[in-house]
Image: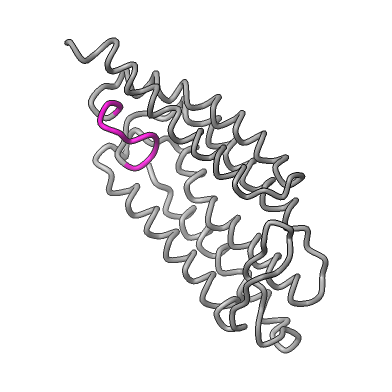
């Protein structure tokens, strides 16, 4: 069951970087870094207003969309408190991380993006992978494909298979920053996504198709 207080708290955390950034408003340049290439070099900028105000507000809206969509799930009672906590933690952590990278870089700090982003993504994948085997059937959380939604057994088997895939993939992603290769992260992410889908279909063909 959704904890409304938790939604409020996490929403405030998303907006906190705006207040912190405003304290440095006069020190920030008109153009603030918002994107880095595979070598960790800044290759994209946005106006001070967009970087400091608009981006956190976008995350704020996305946060509420995710919370609302999950709350309206016909099977929302299957979503545990820990899964709720995971869902509501992503945007706040991302908001703080992005503000640190953008504002820090704009103020002249040396930000090692190639170390920060892969570690962040890797940790997120590992955490998700840890919870995947514990997910019960729902329409918003988990691997939502026809074979898992139509069969609770298929859902459980697929998520037990996906959990270790995401944990192992997450650990590998943590070290991809050493290779400065975005394609490698994309390949690993695709494997993490499609391996459970293929497994689910194969399980369906082998055990359920003829039933």
Q: Position of residue 137 (x, y in %)?
A: 32, 30
Residue drawn at (49%, 39%) of the image:
190
| Front-lying residue, 28 or 22 | 28
Magenta extent:
140-148
Tell me which residue sits at (27%, 30%) in the image.
149
Residue 84, picture quadrant: top left
Residue at 66% across, 78% down = 32
Judge left or right: residue 126 versus residue 153: right
Q: Quadrant of the C terminus?
A: top left
Q: Quadrant of residue 47?
A: bottom right
Q: Left or right: where does residue 33 sit relative to residue 14?
A: right
Q: Main secondary structure of the magenta part?
A: loop
User: How far across and how far down the image is residue 82, in percent?
Assistant: 50, 37
Colour mapping used in the image: one colour
Residue 36 sits above or below residue 88 on the image:
below
At a point 50% along the width and 33% down the height, the residue shown is: 191
Q: Quadrant of the N terminus?
A: top left
Instruction: Point out residue 97 in the picture as x, y percentages from the top left corner.
Output: 66, 60
Left or right for 163, reference 22: left
208 sits left or right of 45 in the view = left
Magenta-drawn stretch contains 95: no
Q: Is residue 195 above or below residue 100?
A: above
Whole-percent x and y of residue 121? 61, 46
Residue 127's image quarter?
top right
């Amino acid at each position: 069951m959704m904890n409304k207080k938790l939604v409020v708290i996490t929403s405030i955390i998303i907006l906190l970087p705006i207040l912190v950034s405003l304290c440095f408003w006069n020190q920030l340049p008109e153009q603030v870094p918002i994107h880095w290439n595979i070598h960790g070099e800044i290759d994209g900028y946005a106006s001070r207003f967009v970087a400091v105000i608009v981006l956190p507000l976008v995350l704020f809206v996305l946060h509420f969309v995710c919370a609302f969509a999950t709350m309206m799930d016909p099977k929302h009672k299957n979503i545990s408190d820990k899964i709720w906590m995971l869902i509501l933690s992503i945007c706040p952590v991302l908001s703080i991380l992005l503000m640190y990278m953008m504002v820090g870089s704009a103020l002249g700090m040396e930000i090692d993006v190639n170390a920060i982003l892969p570690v962040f993504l890797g940790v997120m994948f590992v955490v998700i992978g840890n919870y995947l085997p514990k997910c019960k059937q729902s329409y918003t959380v988990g691997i939502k494909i026809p074979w898992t939604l139509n069969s609770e057994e298929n859902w459980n088997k697929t998520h037990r298979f996906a959990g270790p895939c995401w944990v192992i993939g997450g650990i590998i992603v943590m070290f991809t920053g050493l290779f400065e290769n975005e394609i490698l992260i994309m390949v690993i992410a695709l494997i993490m996504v499609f391996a459970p889908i293929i497994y689910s279909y194969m399980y369906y063909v082998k055990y359920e198709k003829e039933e």
